[in-house]
Structures are given as C-alpha cells and as structure tokens.
Image: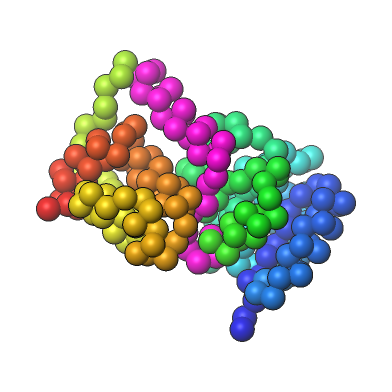
C-alpha cells in the first residue's frame, strides 16, 4: 500500500519532531519532508513529493498563508491542511479562498489530526469545531456589512461546485439529514458540515435554504 506522503512546515523544531513521530507511527502515512520556514518549504517542495502539506499560519519570514498560496500553485496535486493556534476568521476565510482543503487547531486530539490528513488526502474538506464557527460568523459579518441583503442568485457559469458538493446539496434538498448523508457517502458528519460551509461560501449566502434557491436558479436542482 502506498503511504500518504506528508510534508511538515512549522518553525518550532520540537513541535515538528512530535508530529513526525506521530505520523510515522501510522501504517498508511509517512513524513517525506519538513521545513522550518516558508522560504525553505517553497524550495524543498520543488523536488520532494507530497500528498498532504501541513502548514503553520504564523512563522518567521514568509507567513504560512503566503507560503500556502505559492505551494498550492506549484504543487497542484497536493492537499494543503493548515494547522494553527489561531481560529481567526480572516485566516480561515483566506485559507478557503486560496483552495486549502482544511484548517484545524493545534489543540486538537491526535486522532482528529490524523483523521484530517486522511480526509483531505481522500479529496474531502476538513474544518472542525471553533474553526467552523469562525466561518459562520464571517458570513454573518459580511452580510451585515452589506445591509443584510442576500446576493442575487448566481448563474451556472459562476458556480463551481464539486461533484461531491452537488451530490450533497441535492441530498439536502431531498430532506436527507447530515447523519444519513454521512452514512450513505461513507464520510464523517464533520466533513459534511465542511462541505455545507463551502457551498455557502461559493453561493455567497448565509443559509442552506438560500444556497438551494441559488442552486435551483443555476439549474443544479430540479
């Protein structure tokens, strides 16, 4: 079985060492490279293969967010997972906008951390707990800033829902619960919640009902 190749980017050597031991103890993944700065990560990832890149947000020199933009562009097949002490909504929104697959906090459990790696490698999004709450708050702040008006329904050409997101919004439209969707698709409820948030972000709305209205207008629902 081919192991998930993980690349670590964090400017704290002891912390990186702990993550490396944790990951290398798993039978299905291994650390293939590591960097202590954004500059080193950009250089190393040019020749070290990685399936999942785990990136700290705040580092000396180039920030994790700026580094993330560069490595996503240069490593299109790799999944980017931010691992941070901070649940700042601006950080989370920037991570979503650049195409990151996940954002989790450093006080999470080992089990959740490893599940996040496997989930983003499988092509899913992984945002948990307080991070999910910050995204929701950000949507409400943006809506309040525009006077509370919902954006106009988007046309099909403006929507780029993934096949999985289309599948999920159709099941939601059919009245299927998050739990049943998760069981049917074989993914976690947290992953379903992350997909729902990404759907809201793409439609630029605050509720799933508004998203379904826009999906109907874009001929994604019948």
Magenta stretch? 120-146
Q: Left of 114 or right of it: where is 146?
A: left
Q: Residue at x 44, y 52 (%)?
A: 189
Residue 77 % position (x, y): 53, 66
In this figure, what is the number of numbered marks?
Answer: 0
Residue 8 % position (x, y): 73, 58
Q: Residue at x 24, y 54 (%)?
A: 170
Q: Left of 37 or right of it: where is 166?
A: left
* Residue 131 falls within the magenta-colored stretch: yes
Frontmost residue, 5 versus 222: 222
* Residue 136 falls within the magenta-colored stretch: yes
Residue 38 visible in the shown view: yes
Residue 75 visible in the shown view: no
The relative height of residue 103 versus residue 47 in the rendered view (above or below) is above
The relative height of residue 110 versus residue 158 in the rendered view (above or below) is below
Q: Residue at x 31, y 19 (%)?
A: 148
Q: Left of 158 or right of it: where is 24?
A: right
Q: Residue at x 84, y 58 (%)?
A: 17
Residue 163 % position (x, y): 32, 61
Residue furthest out toward the bottom: 1
């Amino acid at each position: 079985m081919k192991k998930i190749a993980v690349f670590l980017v964090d400017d704290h050597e002891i912390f990186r060492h702990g993550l490396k031991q944790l990951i290398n103890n798993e039978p299905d993944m291994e650390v293939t490279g590591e960097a202590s700065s954004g500059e080193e990560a950009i250089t190393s990832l040019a020749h070290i293969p990685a399936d999942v890149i785990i990136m700290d947000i705040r580092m000396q020199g180039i920030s994790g967010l700026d580094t993330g933009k560069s490595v996503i562009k240069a490593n299109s097949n790799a999944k980017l997972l931010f691992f941070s002490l901070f649940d700042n909504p601006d950080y989370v929104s920037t991570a979503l906008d650049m195409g990151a697959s996940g954002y989790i906090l450093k006080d999470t459990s080992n089990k959740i951390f490893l599940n996040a790696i496997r989930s983003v490698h499988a092509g899913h999004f992984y945002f948990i707990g307080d991070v999910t709450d910050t995204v929701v708050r950000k949507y409400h702040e943006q809506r309040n800033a525009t006077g509370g008006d919902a954006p106009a329904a988007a046309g099909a050409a403006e929507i780029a829902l993934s096949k999985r997101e289309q599948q999920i919004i159709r099941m939601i439209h059919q009245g299927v619960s998050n739990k049943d969707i998760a069981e049917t698709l074989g993914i976690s409820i947290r992953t379903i919640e992350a997909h729902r948030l990404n759907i809201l972000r793409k439609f630029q709305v605050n509720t799933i009902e508004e998203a379904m209205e826009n999906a109907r207008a874009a001929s994604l629902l019948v």
